[in-house]
Amino acid sequence: MSVSLGEARTMLGELLPPRQTRMTPLLGAYGLTLASDLQATVNHPSATESALDGVACREADTLSVPVRLELIGESRAGATFAGVVGPGQAVRIYTGAPLPAGADAICPVEQLEDVPGGVRLRRPASVADVRREGDDFRTGETVLYAGQRLTPARVALAAALGHAEVPTLAPLRVAVLSTGDELIEPGRPLVAGQVYNSNAYGLVGLLREAGCEAIMLPPVSDDLAALEAAVASARADVLLTSGGVSMGKYDFMRDLLIEHGEVRFWKVRMRPGGPAMLGGWKGLPVFGLPGNPVSSLVVFQVIVRPALTGRPLTPVRLRAGSAFRGLADKTAFWRVTVRGGEAFAYAQQGSGVLRSLSDAPALVMIPEGGLAAVGDEVDVLLLE
Ligand code: AMP
Ligand code: MG
């Protein structure tokens, strides 16, 4: 029942419920996914305007400098000069102000000298400093696309297009359940053999980054009945669990899905993170992440996040600063630091070494059977 990385992503994606579309005011839209394409309701700029503070004039009048032009008025943002700029004339103009009729070029303020009744230009006026109406986008043009994440820049763009609210996909509600008798919540004392529950805190953050509504459930002990009760309490579209899906006797999450639920796959051909499990419990899709801290976060990044958002992380090609061994039948992920365009293996690659993802927040991805020597190009996923 082992699957490849790509199969795991697809199978999780297929288990997700359909997403509702709703209109969301711009200030609530950050991080959400756009549900349909968006068109401009206006031209931007809405008029041909100046990109600088200076004077607007006729380029042909300024080809030999210095030259004196007569000042006949001003045009500022929101208040256009009403007249026409004739030969030998200029209008004082400010950034974003409409270009007056007759003028076709701008000379920046730094190149001007005030003289009685006018200005002297030290440099010819330039048409390059004129922004044409509709240069950025035109009315009716599609500028934002369904499936895009509404980053702050895209929310700003939606505002510039003239939309006060945007169609968004309702966020998926994802519950996070940590399992393990050894888990202690941070802030409480810990004795040898116990470990602070860190996975849930990473997963909730990653879910929020992925535009989901994350619900952290109280950790549950390694006990089949307790586990089943906890899973039953999850009011969510998807349940993410951590721990309890490996080969051990006390890995009850595995048993719960096998014996009382259903299993779509168990084990993904990747390292770290191999024992991940996908299944369901009474209609609730359940993705069982391995408990090892690095494994759980890496599996999230390369399987869960792409399935939830529809957008896999795009690798960048960098030069290998270290040699990277691949694995015959698994995709291998190495935590790396990136310096000077080269990827260097972090010294400790153990899947329990959580600080590696803080010190080296990037992953070199070596496909099944692959190998990279120093100097080869490798695919790197940048996690921050
Ligand atoms: P498991 O997958 O349950 O066998 O756990 C593998 C390793 O991950 C063990 O060392 C666990 O103590 C550790 N682990 C499991 N869950 C968590 C968690 N929520 N936070 C930190 N470490 C965990
Ligand atoms: Mg465990």
Image (tube, grey):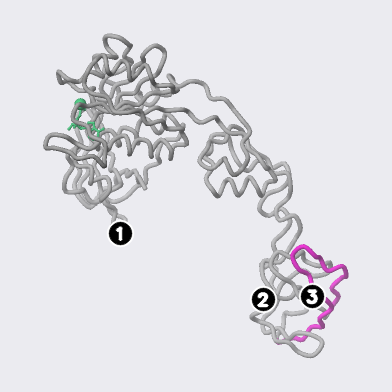
What's the residue at 53%, 36% (across, down)?
33
Q: CA distance from mark 2 to mark 1?
A: 38 Å
Q: Label 3 is placed on what type of residue?
A: Val
Q: Pointer 3: what residue?
A: 91
Chain part drawn in magenta: 66-87
Using a 10 Å C-alpha cutoff, classify the residue at mark 1 as few (fewer than 14 neighbours), some (14 to 19) or many (20 or more).
Answer: few
Q: Label 1 is placed on what type of residue?
A: Gly
Residue 72, image quadrant: bottom right
Using a 10 Å C-alpha cutoff, classify the residue at mark 2 as few (fewer than 14 neighbours), some (14 to 19) or many (20 or more).
Answer: many
Farthest residue, direction bottom: 116
Q: Is residue 96 left or right of residue 299?
A: right
Compared with 13, 333 (above or below) is below
The reply to whether callout 3 and callout 2 are in contact (CB within 8 Å) is no
Q: Is residue 10 left or right of residue 96?
A: left
Q: Earlier in the sequence, mark 1 or mark 3?
A: 3
Front disc: 1 or 3: 3
Q: Label 2 is placed on what type of residue?
A: Pro
Observer-nearest of 181 and 17: 181
Q: CA distance from mark 3 to mark 2?
A: 12 Å
What's the residue at 74%, 56% (across, down)?
133
Q: Pointer 2: what residue?
A: 108
What's the residue at 63%, 33% (across, down)?
23
Residue 185 drawn at (x, y percent) = 26, 36
Which disc number belongs to residue 340? 1
The reply to whether callout 2 and callout 1 are in contact (CB within 8 Å) is no
What's the residue at 81%, 65% (across, down)?
80
Using a 10 Å C-alpha cutoff, classify the residue at mark 3 as few (fewer than 14 neighbours), some (14 to 19) or many (20 or more).
Answer: many
Q: Earlier in the sequence, mark 2 or mark 1?
A: 2
> Dot 1: what SS?
loop
Residue 135 drawn at (x, y percent) = 68, 55
